[in-house]
Amino acid sequence: MYSGMTPKALEWQKKIRKFVNDELIPWEVHAEKNDGDLPKDIEKKHRDIAISLGLPGMGISKESGGLGLNMFEQMIIWEQLGRVTNALCWCFSEAQDWMEENFNDFQKENYLKPLLNGTKKECYAITEKGAGSDVDGSIETTAEKKGDQYIINGEKWYVTSANLADFFFLQAKIKSGENKDKHSLFIIDKDTEGIELIDTPKFSHTYAHHHSIYRFNNVSIPSKNIIGNEGIGMDYTHSWFRHERLGIAARCCGAAERLIDEATIFAKERESFGDKISNYQAIQFMLADCVNELASTRLMLYEICKAHDSNQDVKILHGKCSMIKLLASEMANKIADRAVQIFGGRGYMRENVAERYYRELRVDRIWEGTSEIHRIIIANSLYKRGLKSLIE
């Protein structure tokens, strides 16, 4: 038992684990065989349960209609949600605390509230063809102020969940004026004129949530749709990155736990050469390494969440979020590989949980910053602030 665990966090862990086990996991194979899609009544059931639990607003204050959970409690939830494949845990929209803190009244009424009650879904248009991990330097999409409007031009890649979304969070550089080339973040309704779907590529995983490419051709939006002021969009994007990197790490821990559980059950049942394979040292060594790696990763995740909840310096937190995202994504990939090996031929079947995770977890070493980029962030944090800041 983690020494920092609380009764409230344990209650959420139990509640979400039941939701995942009883409602989501039974539909994994169906989703795998049907391009990630579920029957509409099942989709609605999952969404309604998530909304009834308050998950869309888990990090939003109670005053604004959320649950008011701290980051530790939120990641306890996301860890359990990570125990299901095929992105079935993405059955709800998630409003994050930076939205509550920075939205104007119009945005809170027309976007934050609908996220909380499940009537609207968001997506993030950040990445571009030439700007993957280099979000700050290589973004080419522009926003030009004309009267009380902004004119958006550019192309965005890998816009996750855009096919199911109602609006974009779009990052662009100001085209002219005193804030020229500075980043800003905008809200753009998906049905706005000038938005063009270019392509919907197929990916290794089988998700109902697509990662499409969109072009924004002279898209005109009211100035009230800019978040905050011109030139500070990267502040919001960095906040989103930190949250998402913790979320990826939490889901990786949940995935690793599920893989170890499933592989252990199989090893104790499977016989080969007259004995259970669980009695063979080769299997024991693989499972032992999995347990150690998960336990150490989970401990780091929980400690970084506690640092976040203690309002540690955001620059130090940025480095720590890179640390856990790197560690957890690499850990989960190794465990998925071992699980496939333990299952043998069965582990290569798409109906097997190990095979699905083997494909799905691979992207966690790429999106929201590649493993290589995170190593650079960690090293730079070490150079600037010293080892003590990262490990205490």
Image (cartoon, helix red, strand yellow):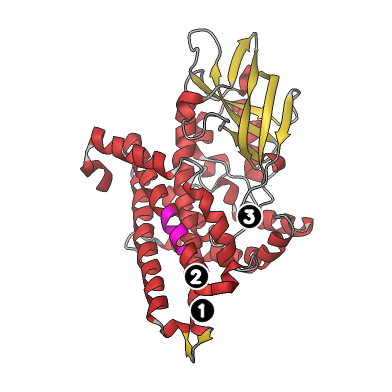
Label 3 and label 2: CA atoms lie apart by: 34 Å
Residue range highlighted in magenta = 330-335
Element assignment for label 2 = helix
Mark 3 or mark 2: which is in front? 2
- Which comes before the other along the chain, label 2 or label 1? 1
Give yes or no for contact between labels 1 and 3 (Cβ–Cβ under 8 Å). Answer: no
Q: Is residue 320 left or right of residue 335?
A: left
Provide the secondary structure element on which disc 3 rests.
helix
Report if residue 63 lies within the magenta region.
no
Determine whether 288 is above or below 356 in the image: below
What secondary structure is found at the residue carrying circle 1?
A: helix
The three-letter amino acid code for the residue at tag 1 is Ile
- What residue did someone put label 2 on? 341
> Dot 3: within a 10 Å radius of its alpha carbon, few (fewer than 14), some, or many (20 or more) residues?
many
First of labels 1, 3 by sequence position = 3
Where does the image place residue 209, in percent across and percent down from the top left?
A: 67, 47
* Residue pointed to by mark 3: 50
SS assignment for the magenta stretch, majority: helix
The x and y percentages for residue 191 are 75, 30
Whole-percent x, y for residue 173 in the image: 53, 19
| Distance from Cα at disc 1 to Cα at disc 3 | 29 Å
Q: Is residue 281 left or right of residue 110?
A: left
Which residue position holds label 1? 265
